Structure formats: structure tokens, C-alpha cells
Image: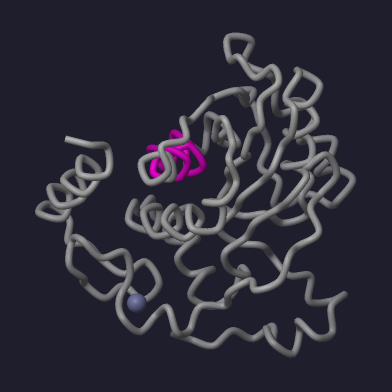
Amino acid sequence: MDRLKLYNFERRIISLLYPNKCPFCGKIINSDKYMCKSCPKFLPYVNKPITPPENVSRLYACCYYAYRARTAVLSMKYKGLIYPVDAFALMMYKKISKEHAHALVPVPSGFMSVQKRGFSTAEKIAQRISWHSGVPVLKALKARDDKQEQKMLNMKMRFENARQSFYINDKADICGKKLILIDDVCTTGSTLSVCAELLLDAGAEEVIAAVFAKTVDLSRNKRESKRFPRKERLI
Ligand SMILES: [Zn+2]
């Protein structure tokens, strides 16, 4: 059985225990579907290239972190739901399918968040992208056990915190390789930038990054703030 068939088989088995739901609206859907019919029409897609953070050659994002996309990320992060991971991975795979990389490198989660959720989000997403693409997952980065969450920190503190949070896994062979960093959300890009710097210093040839959602700084971006008003539509 090839890896994709095995993946779909696993999804079918899981759906017998936990009904498969659309990650964006919660509607029950068939086990072979990743989202309902109507949600794709309402997702806040990123349709233009995004400026990548330092050390990253290109940054791919599927959606802005708003509306249903945000709801789905939150349900994965704080309710520990697994089905958003399948939808995110499929959408991210489509974005990066033309990049011929040697490996996918998940941004590691801190020990505490893995304990809370039961899984590392970036690692699960990378694993599923690998099942679609055949590009292997390489755990080239590790997080220190006391890694602090980035969300409460300002830009400068985020860089410092990220620098202290990660280190290279000595056992991973990354020399001369083109790598794609995988994460769920990109906020300021400081985590991706620091991770890319570590990989490049350790001999990687190029580092690209892919995330499911990119946050928008509404206070700075007038056009975006019209598109994504602060008050979110309820879905
Ligand atoms: Zn839906």
C-alpha cells in the first residue's frame, strides 16, 4: 500500500471513532474530504507573494490569520483537534509542490505545548505534507524544554527568545540541502528567521518556509485593515 493510500486509510479509521469535521466551520463531512463544500469560498487566501523574513528565501502562506482560518488554527492549538492538520497540510502541499526540496523541517514545539496538546503541530503538518509529496521530514531542529511562548513578547524580545529556544539536532544531516521549514502560523517571522539562520550556519544550502496562516498587522496596513476589520465576523 503506498503512503497516500495508507494515510487515507488511517483517516477513515479515525473517522469511525471521531467524526471527520470541516476544520473551518465544524460541519460533519465524509472521511475522504478535508473541508466542507462552502468553506473554500470564504477563506481569507493569501494571493500575493509575501516578503520572507531574514535568512528565508521564500515564504509561502495559504491564508491570512483571520475569520475561519483563525478559528481552525485555534481549534487545533487549544482544543487539540487533529482534523485541521489534514486540511492545512493539503493546502500547504499545493503551495510548495513546485519546490524541489530535500526535506521538510518542522519548527519544534516546546515541551509544555506538546504536553498540553498531545502532539507537535508543525511536526504533524510536516508529516502529512510528506505523505502527499514524498519529501521526507527531517527533525533538524530541537526546542529547549523551557522554551517560552512567543505570543506575549514584542518584536525584539521574540528574536531573543527564539535564539535561546532552538538548537540544531547534531544527528540530522543537512549539509548542502534545500530545506522547507514548516510551521502553522507566522506572526513577525522571528522564529522562522532564527531557525533558518541555525540551519544555514549548520551547512544547509537554502531555507524556504511554509506556514498555513500569516498574521496581518492591521495597525500598519490600511488596505489590509479594510479587508480584515478588527471586529471579526462570527461564523
Ligand atoms: Zn466548512
Is residue 83 one of those drawn in magenta?
no
Residue 224 % position (x, y): 76, 81
Rendered image quadrant of residue 177: top right
In this picture, residue 228 sits left or right of residue 203: left
Is residue 115 one of those drawn in magenta?
yes
The residue located at (17%, 49%) in the rendering is 14
Residue 140 against residue 79 in the figure, above or below: above
Residue 208 against residue 39 in the figure, above or below: above
Q: Which residues are magenta?
A: 114-128
Residue 129 or residue 68, whichever sits in front: 129
Residue 10 or residue 208, whichever sits in front: 208
Residue 99 or residue 138, whichever sits in front: 99
The residue located at (76%, 84%) in the rendering is 225
Give the prevailing secondary structure in the magenta stretch. Answer: helix
In this picture, residue 37 sits left or right of residue 127: left
Residue 153 % position (x, y): 78, 49
Residue 115 % position (x, y): 44, 34
The residue located at (71%, 21%) in the rendering is 176
